[in-house]
Image: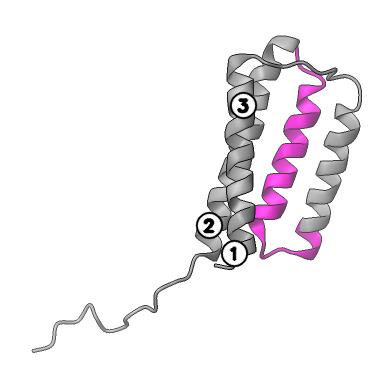
Amino acid sequence: MRPLRLLSAVFFAALGVLIVWLGLTGHVFFDRRGALPILGFAVLLRGGLALYKHRQDWTRWASLLGLGAVMLAMSRVPFGWVPLLMAVCGGLLFLRALGTVFAYAPRTPSRQGATRASC
């Protein structure tokens, strides 16, 4: 795995844990009706573009589409649900980091014929 990709995965994991913590403790201090719908739509659009251009990099487009959808939902649900949806956003970022690590981890060569016992 390349060092920059690993650093990116560590960053997304740390950001995801921080956002989950903020969501679960209820530290939500922002205007969810302000720029959040515009930002959510932009993230959704970027996720669709990533899906169109980079189908193999599923961690990128899946996380962007999920985050965009949850961000748009945060602007429309009752305020009591916003901390839970923030925790979901953080979980999606953490899952993106895990997916990146597992998708780009070096693979060991498979040993074909190792299942047959030699007589």
Classify mark 3: residues with Cα within 10 Å, few (<14), some (14-19) or many (20+).
many
Q: Is residue 117 left or right of residue 68?
A: left
Kindly tell me whether residue 92 is visible in this rendering: no
In the rendered image, which residue does mark 3 sit on?
Answer: 87
Q: What stretch is highlighted in magenta?
A: 51-78
List the residue tagged with mark 2. 101
Query: Is 65 a magenta residue?
Result: yes
Q: Which of marks 1 and 2 is nearer the N terminus?
A: 1
Q: In this view, does 26 lie above or below 21?
A: above
Q: How is the image coloured?
A: one colour
**Residue at left 24%, top 81%?**
114
Distance from the alpha carbon under mark 1 to that under mark 2: 11 Å
The quarter holding residue 26 reads top right
Which residue appears at 69% of the width and 54% of the height? 60
Distance Cα–Cα, label 3 vs label 1: 28 Å
Q: Main secondary structure of the magenta part?
A: helix
Quadrant placement of the N terminus: bottom right
Q: Which of 28 and 32 is in front in this view?
A: 28
Q: State yes or no: residue 73 in magenta.
A: yes
Mark 1 residue type: Pro
Residue that mark 1 sits on: 3
First of labels 3, 1 by sequence position: 1
* Residues marked 1 and 2 touching at CB (< 8 Å): no
Q: What element carries label 2?
A: helix
Q: Position of residue 49 (x, y in %)?
A: 83, 56
| Relative height, residue 81 to residue 87 (above, below) | above
Instruction: Please state the horizontal and vertical placement of residue 81, each as a whole percent of the image.
Output: 68, 15
Residue type marked 2: Val
Closer-to-camera residue (97/11) = 11
Direction left: furthest residue: 119
Label 3 sits on a secondary structure element that is helix
Identify the image quadrant of residue 68: top right
